[in-house]
Image (tube, rainbow, N blue to C red):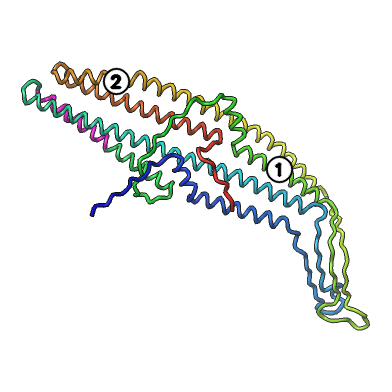
Amino acid sequence: MLSFQEPAPPLTLESAIAETLRGHPRVEALRRELAAKLLAIKGARALTAPSILLSPGLTSFSGTTEELLAVQPLEINGTRSARTAIALAEFHVAQAEARATLLALTYEVRLAVVALDQARAYQRLMEAQVGDAQTLERLAKKQVELGTRPGIDLETLALETLRTENRLTQAAGAVKSAETTLNLLLGRPVGSALPVLAPLALPKEPLATEALLASALTLRPELKQATAEQEGMQAQQKRFQAEGKPDVSPLVRIGNLFRGTPPGSTGNGAGIGVAISLPLDHGSRRAQQAGLQERFEAHKNHYADIARQIEREVREAAEKLSTAQTILARYETEALPRAERLLRASRIGFEEGKTSVLAVIEAQRTHRLIQSDTLQARHDVLLAAAALDKARGLSLVPLPEVQP
């Protein structure tokens, strides 16, 4: 019994990116890293663990003044809040790094889809070229049989057909390589068949440069990461300041816990008290604060450098896209129609016996070269558009909020 199987729907660029983000190991690694950062925040919010000191006297009751001492710092000097602020800043840095990783992954998928589209288009071009070469070879064979064309022309066309078939073999290999790369990114088996790709839309006219720059400065995660790092430095500065302030610690003291009450004593020396820490600084803390302040000022310059680098990337990507679009338009409106007219005229002349084999082969090669260059120009436009989106920090699909 024959069964009809519905063909797989075309694979769009957006669906390929979404499929990759659902199951890629990098995304799972990001979730676990953020989970670790959240646990670090939870630990930072907790009070410092109490310090319990057991010191039993071994030789006599006077071997120690207290056999148990438990101290619990309250951290009312701001140490705990500063520690929590540091952990929060580290979490924000990890969030920015996660977004940068997701953007890089989407860009990688986009390049793989564009590469597969280019490889398949070139394969279709070579298949058409092989068909054209075989048609000319058959026509020449008939003319040789009729005696209107020398036999050496047939041999020349047969060699040209062989060269074109070899290019088709190379194109098929390039398609398999591109399919393997995309399958690995999608998390599919290497040998699985990929459906037909949905047509990749060429970008529209880009926004004005100032609008592109404003978008990049808002979306690029590197700037958000730099801001979070500055927040972390400020929190570290507050921690240094807090560590230099007094703190209060309730304590429990038991003088005789293991050996019992000594003779002549009325109790075991147990009691509850309060300890006040008075931290002293011989210059170490001040030096660390001064060094951290220098790092903070240096990071301001680093932030400005990142902004300049983003501006350079956006301007270069926009210029490359504009150039690629101009070249593609010239190929589609000028070069390709002229090459098609040249090939059509040479074939008509060949059929009528007025055009030599070499002239037909040269017209075929010119047409094939122009078609290949047009495909490459289209590929360059798609790559330039992807690079511009990457420079802006823009993704074709909404990036998932990676939650642990």
> Does label 1 or label 2 sit earlier along the sequence?
1
x 32%, y 21%: residue:
336
Q: Quadrant of the N terminus?
A: bottom left
Horizontal relation, residue 349 to residue 188: left or right: left
x 57%, y 43%: residue:
99
Q: Which secondary structure dominates the residues rendered in magenta?
A: helix
**In the image, what residue type sits under mark 2?**
Ala
Horizontal relation, residue 323 to residue 30: left or right: left
Q: Is residue 226 above or below residue 263?
A: above
Place of residue 150 in the rendered image (x, y in percent of width and height, measured from the top left): 9, 22
Labels 1, 2: front one: 2
For label 2, count other residues whose C-alpha is less than 10 Å away and answer few (under 14), some (14-19) or many (20+).
Answer: many
Q: For the image shown, how many numbered marks are present on the structure?
A: 2
Q: Quadrant of residue 57?
A: bottom right
Q: Quadrant of residue 153?
A: top left
Give the residue pinned by disc 1: 231
Q: Is residue 84 above or below residue 392?
A: below
CA distance for labels 1 and 2: 61 Å
Place of residue 272 in the rendered image (x, y in percent of width and height, measured from the top left): 87, 69
Place of residue 126 in the rendered image (x, y in percent of width and height, measured from the top left): 27, 32
**In the image, what residue type sits under mark 1?**
Glu
Comparing 76 with 120, the one in front is 120
The magenta segment:
150-168
Local secondary structure at mark 1: helix
Comparing 164 with 338, the one in front is 338
Q: Is residue 305 above or below residue 41?
A: above
Assess whether residue 185 is covered by the magenta stretch. Answer: no
Local secondary structure at mark 2: helix
Comparing 395 with 115, the one in front is 395
Q: Which mark is residue 339?
A: 2
Q: Which mark is residue 134?
A: none
